[in-house]
Image: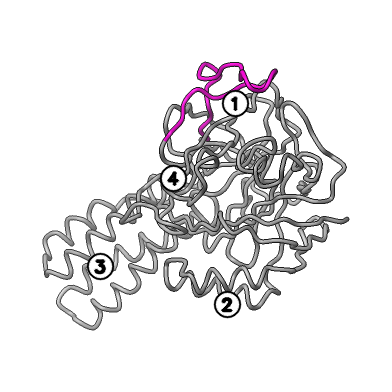
């Protein structure tokens, strides 16, 4: 039996401390200098290689929603939710009807985390239901700008989605959020509450661009958690006094500990603290080859459609000696090998209409499996052991 690596070096984007200053509104809190017009884009960040444990293959670590700030949860038994998620995957987008079905399926639902905690969904937030699609190695896939729930790309930088003391919670909850919700902030915490504002992050498929989450206990929050004003006009419809969303970005430190799951689908999800948990997407070893294979197959498909035999031969030859890197996760390794096999078969279908059509189906399926597709939404939950 092959030995599987359980720790990988992943590139994550952080805010440099050089781009921060003391927040005049919050003594002792650092604020990130820059604001960007698009959410969580690669603007003014620095990339660090971080060791991350693959929880699929390392079962010695069991995250916990209260201590780590995140866990995974089983969604397989929620049949109505699974039907709606399958509909989104087929459509490639979130429709109003499917969004309503998801909210209805989750309202009042009881969810069990992998660590055994019982979550009861008390409220599904009206905003924040977002579908993200991204290609391997940062490859762009969106054909249009983000609008509503659709057209979003994986979040590049490490962040947490809401400041419990900031906008819009301070307006929506009249300043009561810090006493009601469990949280860790640079200038305060609540470790007693059983009520949590959480992100439910559902992978429709994820073997590239995985979500990576940190054990919040390994962060020095006064030094490395930075307040950040995020304009939301381009993707949320809010009142004027709430258009700048107060979130957190994070600075890097070697003591921080990171975790991910190398293979997930819609039968499970991450649940993590919206107010405190550092998270972001990463690029896995081998995604550069996955990107080249994806684009190569796409080009061969186009060449076959116009009968350009020479182009097919040339494109296939470019990948003749390529091998999937052993440093890749097992799931990504299988996906790359699958694309290389499909690519090698392309010359044999030239001139045969039926086999060409069958190959095109195989090629599109092989390419699709290396796209990261995920859905996220905000829930208020009560949590008990």
Q: Residues within 10 Å of mark 1 (few under 14, many from 20)?
A: many
- Going from the N terminus, do you reach mark 2 or mark 4 first? 2
Disc 1 to disc 2, C-alpha distance: 40 Å
Looking at the image, which is closer to me, 103 or 308? 103
- Residue where numbered disc 2 is placed: 83
- Residue where numbered disc 3 is placed: 346
Place of residue 140 in the rendered image (x, y in percent of width and height, measured from the top left): 35, 49
Mark 2 and mark 4 in contact? Answer it, CB < 8 Å: no
Position of 11 compared to 270: left or right? left
The boundaries of the magenta stretch are 12-36
Place of residue 307 in the rendered image (x, y in percent of width and height, measured from the top left): 11, 70
Place of residue 194 in the rendered image (x, y in percent of width and height, measured from the top left): 84, 50
In front: label 1 or label 4 = 4
Q: Residues within 10 Å of mark 2 (few under 14, many from 20)?
A: some
- Going from the N terminus, do you reach mark 3 or mark 1 first? 1
Disc 4 to disc 3, C-alpha distance: 46 Å
Residue depicted at 71% across the width and 25% down the height:
220
Disc 1 to disc 4, C-alpha distance: 29 Å
In front: label 1 or label 2 = 2
In the rendered image, which quarter is residue 109 located in?
bottom right
Element marked by disc 4: loop
- Residue where numbered disc 1 is placed: 252
Looking at the image, which is closer to me, 120 or 347? 120
Q: Residues within 10 Å of mark 4 (few under 14, many from 20)?
A: some
- Residue where numbered disc 4 is placed: 233
Q: Residue furthest bottom?
A: 354
């Amino acid at each position: 039996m092959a030995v599987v690596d359980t720790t990988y070096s992943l590139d994550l984007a952080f805010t440099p401390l050089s781009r921060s200053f003391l927040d005049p509104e919050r003594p002792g809190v650092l604020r990130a200098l820059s604001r960007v017009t698009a959410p969580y884009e690669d603007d003014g960040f620095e990339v660090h290689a971080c060791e991350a444990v693959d929880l699929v293959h390392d079962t010695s670590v069991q995250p916990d929603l209260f201590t780590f700030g995140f866990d995974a949860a089983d969604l397989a038994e929620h049949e109505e939710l699974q039907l709606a998620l399958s509909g989104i995957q087929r459509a490639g987008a979130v429709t109003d009807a499917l969004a309503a079905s998801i909210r209805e399926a989750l309202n009042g639902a009881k969810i069990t985390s992998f660590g055994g905690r019982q979550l009861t969904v008390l409220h599904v937030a009206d905003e924040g239901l977002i579908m993200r699609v991204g290609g391997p190695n940062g490859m762009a896939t969106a054909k249009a700008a983000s609008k509503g729930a659709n057209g979003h790309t994986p979040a590049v930088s490490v962040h947490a989605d809401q400041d419990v003391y900031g906008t819009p919670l301070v307006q929506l909850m009249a300043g009561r959020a810090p006493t009601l919700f469990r949280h860790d902030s640079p200038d305060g915490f609540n470790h007693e509450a059983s009520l949590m504002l959480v992100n439910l992050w559902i992978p429709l498929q994820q073997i590239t661009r995985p979500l990576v989450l940190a054990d919040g206990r390994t962060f020095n929050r006064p030094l490395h958690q930075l307040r950040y004003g995020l304009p939301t006009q381009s993707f949320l419809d809010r009142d004027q006094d709430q258009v700048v969303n107060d979130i957190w970005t994070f600075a890097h430190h070697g003591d921080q500990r990171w975790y991910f799951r190398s293979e997930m689908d819609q039968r499970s999800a991450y649940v993590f603290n919206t107010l405190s948990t550092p998270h972001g997407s990463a690029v896995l070893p081998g995604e550069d080859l996955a990107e080249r294979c994806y684009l190569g197959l796409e080009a061969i498909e186009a060449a076959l459609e116009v009968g350009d035999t020479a182009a097919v031969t040339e494109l296939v030859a470019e990948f003749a000696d390529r091998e999937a890197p052993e440093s890749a996760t097992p799931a990504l390794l299988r996906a790359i090998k699958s694309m290389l096999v499909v690519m090698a078969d392309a010359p044999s279908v030239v001139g045969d209409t039926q086999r060409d059509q069958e190959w095109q189906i195989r090629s599109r399926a092989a390419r699709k499996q290396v796209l990261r597709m995920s859905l996220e939404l905000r829930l208020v939950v009560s949590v008990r052991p």
